Amino acid sequence: MSASPPIPAGARIGHVHLKVSDIQRALDFYCGVLGFELQQMYGSQAAFVSAGGYHHHIGLNTWESAGGQPPPPGTTGRSSMSPGTLK
């Protein structure tokens, strides 16, 4: 694998979309704990949240993940996130 230059220190991620198993549980965390604001619901299957009124920083959906279980230990998948990773 060839060496690639690192991402510039000032780089920012515009927005992300996450597959979640439960929309309400995800909203309880992202809005209730982290302080994001609900911008829009797409039926009962998706929600879009942001900080500062932007259309969305995080899209949450259950399109292929409703009722899913957390990944087993030692496998890929996100089971937690540090608020410092979102700027």
Image: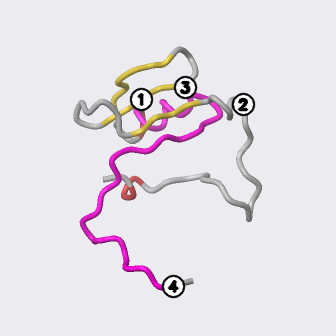
Question: In the shown orientation, is residue 70 left or right of residue 2?
Answer: right
Q: Nearer the viewer, residue 58 or 28?
A: 58
Amino acid of disc 2 = Gly
The location of residue 75, given as percent across then percent down, is 73, 61
Q: Which residues are magenta?
A: 2-31
Q: Earlier in the sequence, mark 4 or mark 2?
A: 4
Q: Quadrant of residue 63?
A: top right
Label 3 sits on residue = 24
* Residue 5, above or below 63: below
Label 4 sits on residue = 2
Question: In the shown orientation, is residue 64 left or right of residue 80?
Answer: right
The location of residue 48, given as percent across then percent down, is 42, 29
Question: In the shown orientation, is residue 58 left or right of residue 53?
Answer: right
Q: Quadrant of residue 19?
A: top right
| Quadrant for the N terminus in the image | bottom right
Q: Residues within 10 Å of mark 3 (few under 14, many from 20)?
A: some
Residue visible at 24% across and 66% down in the picture: 10
Question: Badges 1 and 2: C-beta atoms under 8 Å apart?
Answer: no
**Foreground mark, 1 or 2?**
1
* Residue 25, above or below 86: above
- Magenta-span inclusion, residue 64: no
**Foreground mark, 4 or 1?**
4
Amino acid of disc 1 = Phe
Label 2 sits on residue = 67
Q: Please say which color scheme the image uses.
A: secondary structure
Q: CA distance from mark 3 to mark 2?
A: 12 Å
Label 1 sits on residue = 48
Q: CA distance from mark 4 to mark 2?
A: 40 Å
